[in-house]
Amino acid sequence: MEYIGPVFFGLLLAVFHVLELMVVTKSIKTLILCRKKVDAEVKSVTEEVHEHKDSKTGRVKYSYSYRVTFKYEYNGQTYESCGTSSYRYEKNMKTTIKINPHKPTDICLRGELKSLLMVSLFIPILVMFDCFYVMVVFYSY
């Protein structure tokens, strides 16, 4: 019975590791496979506002991301795909995006490398929790 706490916490850490690994590998795969540049037109843009409160100062800060739908042609077919970006696109704007030539509905937008780097910052945090977990388990028994 005394092992239930450490086992539960260890399983929880394992779940976080698996989720982190899935997100990072999917992002890397997208960045690698989306290599064909195509001309596109922005069909719609939805702004998403994210509110962050600074724990020290209490000041509220805002960040923005944009859900963008693009229309483009590849190999004689017309496609519409959505993506999320920190870059602000305008409706009817002409731009260049990268697509996966094997699956043209997969797109890569500006700012996705930045998003991947932000997600990757969670890896050291998980490693810190791993070290804490090992210390607690080994030093408490």
Image: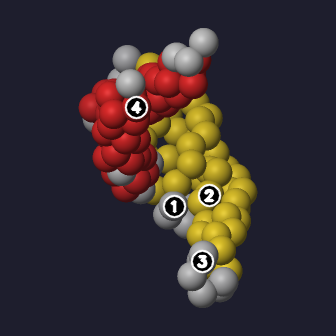
Work out whether residue 49 or residue 68 is closer to the camera in this orientation and state it. 49
Give the residue at x 52% y 17%: 3
Which label's residue is closer to the chain start, 2 or 3?
3
**Which SS class for mark 2?**
strand
The Cα atoms of the two marked residues, 2 and 1, are separated by 6 Å
Q: Are marks 2 and 3 in contact (CB under 8 Å)?
A: no
Which label's residue is closer to the chain start, 1 or 4?
1
Question: How has the structure been colored for display?
Answer: secondary structure
Q: Are marks 2 and 1 in contact (CB under 8 Å)?
A: yes
**Which SS class for mark 4?**
helix
Which label's residue is closer to the chain start, 4 or 3?
3
Which label's residue is closer to the chain start, 2 or 1?
2
Q: How crowded is mark 3: few (under 14 residues within 10 Å), some or many (20 or more)?
A: few
The Cα atoms of the two marked residues, 4 and 3, are separated by 35 Å
Q: Mark 4 points at which residue?
A: 140
Residue type, label 2: Tyr
Q: Mark 4 or mark 2: which is in front?
A: 4
Which label's residue is closer to the chain start, 3 or 1?
3
Reply above or below: 31 against 46. above
Residue type, label 4: Ser
Identify the disc placed on residue 54: 3
Q: Are marks 3 and 1 in contact (CB under 8 Å)?
A: no
**Which SS class for mark 1?**
loop
Give the residue at x 52% y 54%: 85
Report x, y in % for residue 24.
38, 34
Residue type, label 3: Asp
The Cα atoms of the two marked residues, 1 and 4, are separated by 45 Å
Residue type, label 1: Ser
